Image: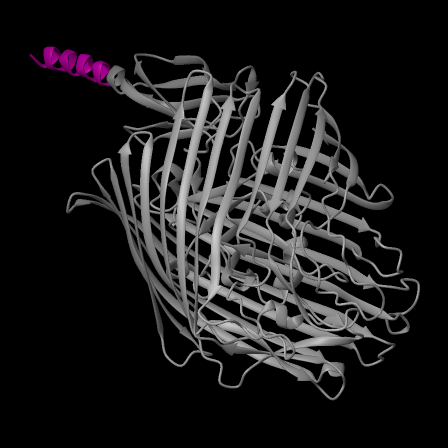
Amino acid sequence: MKRLIKLLALILTGLGTVNAQNFTISGKILDKNNPIVGATIFLSETKQGTITDENGSFIMKNVAKGSYTVKVSCTGYLSKEILVTINGDTNMSDILLQEDFLRLEEVVITATRNEILRKDAPIICSVLDDKIFNATQSIVLSEGLSFQPALRVENNCQNCGFNGLRMNGLEGAYSQILIDGRPIFNSLQGVYGLEQIPANMIERVEVVRSGGSALYGSSAVAGTVNVITKEPKKNSTYLNTNQAFINGTTPDQTYMIGTDFVTEDNNAGVSINGFSRNRKPWDLNDDGFSEMGQMKATSVSLKAFYKPSELSKITFNGFNIYEFRRGGNKFDRPFHQADITESTTHNILNGGLTYEQYTTNKNHKFSTYLNYQTLDRNSYYGAGGDINAYGNSKDNSLVGGFQYTGKLGKFAGGPHTLVSGFEYNLNNLQDDAPSYDRFINQTASQFGFYLQDVWEIGKKVNVLLGGRLDRHNLVGKPVLSPRVNIGYKITPNLQYRVGYARGFRAPQVFDEDLHVTQVNGGGTVIRNAGNLTPEYSNAYSTSIDFYKYYSNWSVGFTMDGFYTQLSNVFILEEQGVEGNGDLLLERRNGYGANVLGLTINPKIQYKNKLSLQLGLTLQKSEYDEAVQWSETVNNTSKRFFRTPNQYGFYVVSWSATKSLTLNLSGVYTGGMLVQHYAGYITDDVLEATPSFFENNFKINFSPKLKGNLGISFNAGIQNFTNSYQKDFDLGINRDSGYIYGPGRPRTFFVGMSIKI
């Protein structure tokens, strides 16, 4: 009997060993014949996962016998689910993924402050990536943003090139610029910052339009632009150069270099990217004064990560930006020996640290972050040899916070995802401009607590309910900003969204206040009224979104409407000329304003050969009462200044052969009302500008080489129709703020890119 029991135990042990045996799953993920690096392979039943290596290959170990759903996904491609039965080591061979041209399965974070598929987000989030930057030959952030729906980049100074972003018809101060989700982009950086961030530093840009204050605090009234910096994905090195010639004569040279390194186990990596630009000043009308200023810029950005465990991650990101720019005349002389000089030298140092921790079941995530930026700016805004027009500005910003994200399970009709946290933002600005009697020492601190729930009701309805409570030291009482968004999937390919958000702007110094426009040989200075109170907004949005993949075609169409109501709106009104001859503009509270509009954004792709996307915005922006911007002009128009009622863009790419790609792109700007101050002209005038249609052409040739070496050559013409302003003021008395339309004339360029 004892021998029989021992024998039975041995048999059962052997059977148990067989049943407990684990196997491997392997395969290769391809885009046609090219390997896809960094694709994720995930078993839905066990949550086991791995990623592909530089050859597109993967292997998943310790998989028990059974049936599984293998989900394959990668940014820029449609995900795929495959049913497999594991009886032994299994090779899934080659798995082909289709390009996600419509970006439906792209994971975005800005819409809900948590990772969510773009097609499932209850609010529309558009994405600007490398494809648009490359197709349009955009070398900095400001150039690429022109190719996003309802966004328009405007040029505000003939001397220094100060530009700004208008979103949904509202000027730059109404938009919140984020760097990796952090509101570290401050007022001083906002003057020239959009042109200081190079394209090779950017992984992608996520844009959420309409009110976002419920998640991101003050200034997110028109929307939010989140610049997500490059994170290392595979071992690679690149070198790019762009040699441009403004009007065919004036050089604008750019060089970009970078390298990524990732460990074999993908537990650590670093991405380093460098940028250098040298642009000479350009004079359109031979009056000796520049229409485009001189610029020298260098930057280095770094992003590194380390995973202490499968459930945790530490990320460091930072950059250093140096930029010198100068406009006016007599560039070979010291600033104060020229008739007009507007010049700035920026040194920006930014660094941030983020720690993320998941629970074992990955249903709960805790993250904490700290980011610090210091900006030092030396400036000269002066005319007529003013020795006192030198200035210095320092801007220090600190952002820290904690966030919890949790999947709370199903109740009340569906699963809930909760996002909650707090954020502290401290900014100290010191600006010293003796010639303009401007001495600013402003400390703005803001503590915000936010709570949000994304509720999925069945498979058709997503409801976002959230709010943020802010305590701002420049606002007398706490401000509550609620937000609600609803997404309804009418069919699997047709979705309707509607939303509301309340926002505010604190009575503080904004970016345009820190720039001094030269008019009639003097400066134009902006100051806040002593009794300035906060501005509040109510923003409403609605959209219809259709998307479908056919055998050879990808078709998408989005139409969205927006309406923003402003109360206690900030306006600028002339207060006469000060004793030193400078024009004073005072920021006051007006009664209110209304902005409403419609944006149409179709996208079409045929196979991988031809793609088209365009955006057209029709809008109306008006104050409740006409703004009396000049003491000599009786303004009867309620329209916003510098805001066209129509604007848009298009981008077309055609892969003529495997090595040759042709790109066409363009930006349309409708007519607008622009203030024109006296100096070169006799009296102040409110001008009605013509419309502009800027068109660009680029050809790219990428010969097929053996191994990992890739090389491409490109050439083209930006604004080849030379659609450009014709009526600039001349000479020392010109109004340098009288500038509108495209930011550059006809410009020729050639470039080369090498990748390893």
Decide: is 430 above or below 101. below
Between 129 and 613, the one nearer to me in the picture: 613
Residue at (61%, 27%) from the top-left corner? 653
Q: Which residues are magenta?
A: 1-16
Task: Look at the image and tell me whether residue 219 can be seen.
Answer: no
- Looking at the image, the residue that sits furthest to the left is 1
Q: Is residue 287 magenta?
A: no
The picture quadrant where one finds residue 688 is bottom right
* 277 or 527: nearer the viewer: 527
Q: Up-down: is 691 above or below 553?
A: below
- As displayed, is residue 746 above or below residue 634? above
Nearest the eye: 135 or 589: 589
Residue at image point 66% right, 72% down: 394
Q: Is residue 373 left or right of residue 72?
A: right
Residue 736 vs 283, above or below: the answer is below
How many numbered marks, from 0 up? 0
Front-most of residues 392 and 743: 743
Quick check: 357 left or right of 730? left
Q: Quadrant of the C terminus?
A: top right
Residue plotted at (89% across, 56% down): 286
Indicate the position of residue 56 as horizontal and vertical percent values. Answer: 53, 22
Image quadrant holding the N terminus, namely: top left
Does the magenta run of residues contain 14?
yes
Q: Position of residue 274 (x, y in %)?
A: 71, 46
Q: Residue furthest bottom?
A: 579
